[in-house]
Image (spheres, grey):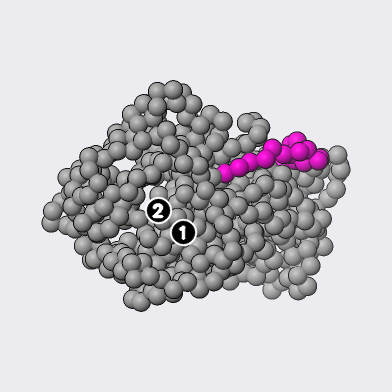
Amino acid sequence: MTCLIFGKEDLKVTRMNRRKINIVPYVILFILILFVNGKMRAQEIIHLFPDRSFAVSGDTVWFSIFIYSDDSNETSEVVHVQLDDLANNHVSKVSILCSGKTGEGYIHIPDSLSTGIYVLKPFSLVQKISGKGVINQKLITVYNRFDNETGVIEEPDGIKLKRYDINKEVVITTGKEQYEKGENVNVEIRIPGTGIDQYKKVFAFAGLADPFSQRFLSGWIPSSTIAKTENPVMLTEKNGILISGKVVSNETDVPVANAIVLLSIPDTIPFFDYCISDSAGEFYFYLRNATGVANLVIQALSQNEEKCKIKLSYSFIEVGSIPATQKILTLEETTFIGNIIKASYYSKLFKGYKIGTPDNFMLPMQFKYPFYGPPTKTYYPDLFVDLPDFREISREILHGVQYRERKGGTTIRLQNQSISALFSQEPLRLLDGIPVFDNKIFAPMGTNDIKKVDVVFYKRFYGDLTFNGVLSVYTKNKSLDWVDLKPGIGHFEYSCLQLAKRFEFMNGRVPDTHVPNLNKVLFRTTVKEIKSQIDFNFFTSDIKGDVEINVILIDKNNHISYAHKFIDVK
């Protein structure tokens, strides 16, 4: 067992018993439980069905996910969807929590993204770390909304798309073949009576057909992963995400083994975990049910007091790049591009422009109290007279807290109420939930700065950690400026699970005639109850051109097929 004591020095580590692996509850959840030791993993196949084959920069692309595994007990429930360019340069990534082997999510196309073909790559952590399996990549063309002239575009060269089989049994009918803009379209999808029981998932969507990229909707590019993890930790993500990184020397960049890595998330009631870096300097944390973008504060403390820094992995998957060649666009293609770029401009004009912002971070709290337990006493300094600094606050308000400033530095001691004496070593010090190893940070804080102070006057234990009391300071205006200025502390914004949202655009009602309908996607749904006939309706856009209606079907043997139909909008 590793016993970590916050004492006279910032950190003391003693080896007491090597029989235990140095991990604690809630830290590396499930990491070393039957997932390693050479166990063969089930192969996972993940398909992504975006609701369009093209987008204008600034759009949000919605998609459906289907997961297949030859071992149902081992199927991942978290799928990461990564947006790259053809050269494998990473743009962004979202993580989707799935249920029943399917899921839905969305990815924002950055407003600054240049015109070109990009790749949506769905993958699981099992695929990433094992380097096995195939990543089924979906192509999507992005047109920059500030690009007035698009005559040439880089397209995949020498790579043939694999396509879903056309389902000839499924019939899509509409009232007619040609429609006016803003006209209602009633759609009937007929599934033969003998086939109703054989399908388990049906996805339907309709939208403008881009003459250049519409072929991308019915196909994908398979690619093998390039595994780069030297010491793979096999984990099936079920209800959260794995956060990983490496501890390296601040001076030499050499990996540091057996460093104690501390994770704090100040966006919550103080969240704290720790683990020990392995022989390659790697560390892992597992966050359950965390959604949105988290502020992670990570610190590493080496056994020999060597200064360390953190290199966080953002869990992008690496695959081979896709060769490309220039293609000169036809008049029909450039006309369509010009129309949708103009439509995007007018849509922003009428509806306003909303920049895609990350979701607020949320992490369900399992306990009423922070990780250090219920405080012995809580103080509220602003209820007292105005005091200019922490030294005065400790003297006048924080009884049982000894704060001393000397030439050699600043020390803090707490009263040990178990024996009615001061602890001989320093307590765990927290500032807005983040461990502090430099007491000078507290010095300028007065009653106008501090919201409350929790103090624990007893020994506390957390896994293998021993705290000689706890002093936890909460400020009124939480700021991580001090973290960004302290060397050796890593502050990272990390996207956790995407917060589930409904596809709010329901284009089945009579449109407002005063506001033009400039939507590129006109309808999308996941059919929950598969019947012999599925009906839906949508209104055509004010943008003229072909509209494609697509139906994706997955049978009980996990075979994917599709049916589609075009209508003309004059």
Q: Relative to 383, say whether 41 is above or below.
A: above
Viewer-side residue, 156 vs 500: 156
| Residue 106, x across and y down, in percent | 43, 51
| Residue 47, x across and y down, in percent | 54, 45
Q: Quadrant of the C terminus?
A: bottom left
Badges 2 and 1: C-beta atoms under 8 Å apart? yes
Relative to residue 182, is residue 171 drawn left or right?
Answer: right
Residue at 74% x, 65% y is: 248
Q: Residue furthest bottom?
A: 149
Q: Residue 32 lies in what quarter of the image? A: top right
Range of magenta residues:
30-46
Q: Quadrant of the N terminus?
A: top right
Q: From the image, tell me which residue sits under label 2.
A: 52
Q: From the image, tell me which residue sits under label 1.
A: 140
Relative to residue 434, is residue 227 drawn left or right?
Answer: right
Identity, as a three-letter code, of the amino acid under mark 1:
Ile
Q: In this view of the protein, can residue 110 be seen by the observer?
A: yes
Identity, as a three-letter code, of the amino acid under mark 2:
Arg
Q: Residue 88 lies in what quarter of the image? A: bottom right
| Residue 333, x across and y down, in percent | 36, 67
At label 1, counting other C-alpha atoms closer than 10 Å, the crowd grade (few under 14, some 14-19, many 20 or more) is: many
Q: Secondary structure at mark 2?
A: loop
